[in-house]
Image (cartoon, helix red, strand yellow):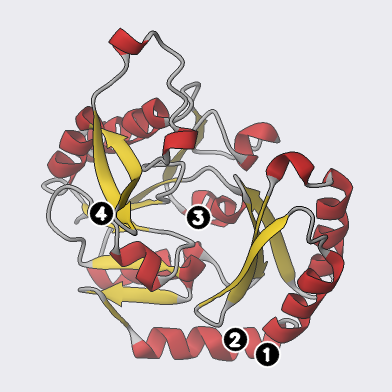
């Protein structure tokens, strides 16, 4: 029976230059591999050690990238090793099989959202009306499923985020602050549901997972064993759960440690 590894990407396995957290002397910094280029510029990295471990993991488990990114944003990532057969995009709104969205899965998700939470248009309109242009840099809708703002984090009022979260919760939505992005995501739109479907299709009897943000909490609660880095929303709130290990490492070294834990656990006798 296969092992399934479902991992968040940004700030869990891959890191922008701003999120690397290279606090050691320059001469001791790890060698980095660029895994994403956007508009002809390098954007995301992992350590070369993590890259090799991820390649090795492909021989031991079914690796499933599990991300809030849209399909287009995900497909520009070039992870080491063979292309994953399955990937979860748009926080579970799309289940990719060999790079193509499973139409039946997506249809089921959109039907559930229509029946259980406020419409996207209402949430987006509230975001735009209540946010201050002084600290908003961009506003986006992702795959017609959820919305997010790109903000100047140092100018963002903490009280506004709390008020938005309360407003959204009353309408069946979740708010997550990740780096410079504020996400508003329908509550039923979850990574865990899509990962359970992949586990069913593959017959996996052990599911491992990792993530750093509030949007990863449902994934970590659904897996058999999980890990979270020492940074991100979950670390900031000291979030934990049975079977979830809180790692001390921060930044790109946390990503390296996570892949190492995946590989060690996948290889262990069961």
Of residues 180 and 71, which is closer to you in this image? 180
Q: How far apart are marks 3 and 1 (CA)?
A: 22 Å
Q: Can residue 131 be seen in this view?
A: yes
Q: Can residue 119 be seen in this view?
A: no
Of residues 71 and 102, which is closer to you in this image? 71
Q: Which residue is drawn at 21% across and 41% down?
A: 54
Where, by quadrant of the figure, is residue 95 drawn? Answer: bottom left
Q: Cβ–Cβ below 8 Å for labels 3 and 4?
A: no
Q: Which residue is drawn at 32% across and 16% down?
A: 29
- Whichever of callouts 3 and 2 sits on the residue coming sooner in the sequence is 2
Q: How far apart are marks 3 and 4 (CA)?
A: 14 Å
Q: Is residue 77 left or right of residue 131?
A: left
Depicted 38 relative to depicted 89: above or below? above
Where, by quadrant of the figure, is residue 269 drawn? Answer: top left
Judged from the image, the secondary structure of the residue bearing numbered disc 4 is strand
Q: Cβ–Cβ below 8 Å for labels 2 and 1?
A: yes
- Residue identified by numbered label 3: 219
Disc on res. 63: 4
- Whichever of callouts 3 and 1 sits on the residue coming sooner in the sequence is 1
- Residue identified by numbered label 2: 112
Placement of the C terminus among the 4 image quadrants: top left
Q: Distance between the residues labelled 2 and 4?
A: 27 Å
Of residues 202 and 5, which is closer to you in this image? 5
Disc on res. 115: 1
Q: In this view, does 147 lie to the left or right of 61?
A: right
- Whichever of callouts 2 and 4 sits on the residue coming sooner in the sequence is 4
- Whichever of callouts 1 and 4 sits on the residue coming sooner in the sequence is 4
Residue 50 appears at what percent x and percent y? Answer: 25, 33
At label 4, counting other C-alpha atoms closer than 10 Å, the crowd grade (few under 14, some 14-19, many 20 or more) is: many
Q: In this view, does 199 lie to the left or right of 53?
A: right
Residue 101 appears at what percent x and percent y? Answer: 33, 81
């Amino acid at each position: 029976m296969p092992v399934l590894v479902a991992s968040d990407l940004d700030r869990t396995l891959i890191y922008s230059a701003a999120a690397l957290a290279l606090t050691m002397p320059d001469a001791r910094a790890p060698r980095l591999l660029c895994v994403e280029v956007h508009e002809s510029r390098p954007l995301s990295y992992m350590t070369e050690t993590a890259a090799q471990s991820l390649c090795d993991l492909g021989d031991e488990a079914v690796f499933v990238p599990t991300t809030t990114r849209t399909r287009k944003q995900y497909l520009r990532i070039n992870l080491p090793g063979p292309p994953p057969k399955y990937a979860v995009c748009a926080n579970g709104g799309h289940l990719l099989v060999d790079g193509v969205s499973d139409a039946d899965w997506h249809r089921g998700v959109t039907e559930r959202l229509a029946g259980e939470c406020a419409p996207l248009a209402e949430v987006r309109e509230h975001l735009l009306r209540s946010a201050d242009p002084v600290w908003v840099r961009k506003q986006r809708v992702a795959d017609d499923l959820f919305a997010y703002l790109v903000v100047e984090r140092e100018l963002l009022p903490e009280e506004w985020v709390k008020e938005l979260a309360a407003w959204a919760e009353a309408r069946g939505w979740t708010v997550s602050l990740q780096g410079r992005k504020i996400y508003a995501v329908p509550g039923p739109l979850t990574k865990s549901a899509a990962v359970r479907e992949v586990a069913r299709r593959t017959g996996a009897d052990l599911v491992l997972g990792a993530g750093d943000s509030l949007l990863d909490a449902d994934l970590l609660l659904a897996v058999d064993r999980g890990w979270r880095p020492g940074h991100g929303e979950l670390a900031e709130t000291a979030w934990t759960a049975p079977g979830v290990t809180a790692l001390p490492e921060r930044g790109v070294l946390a990503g390296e440690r996570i892949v190492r834990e995946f590989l060690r656990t996948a290889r262990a006798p069961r």
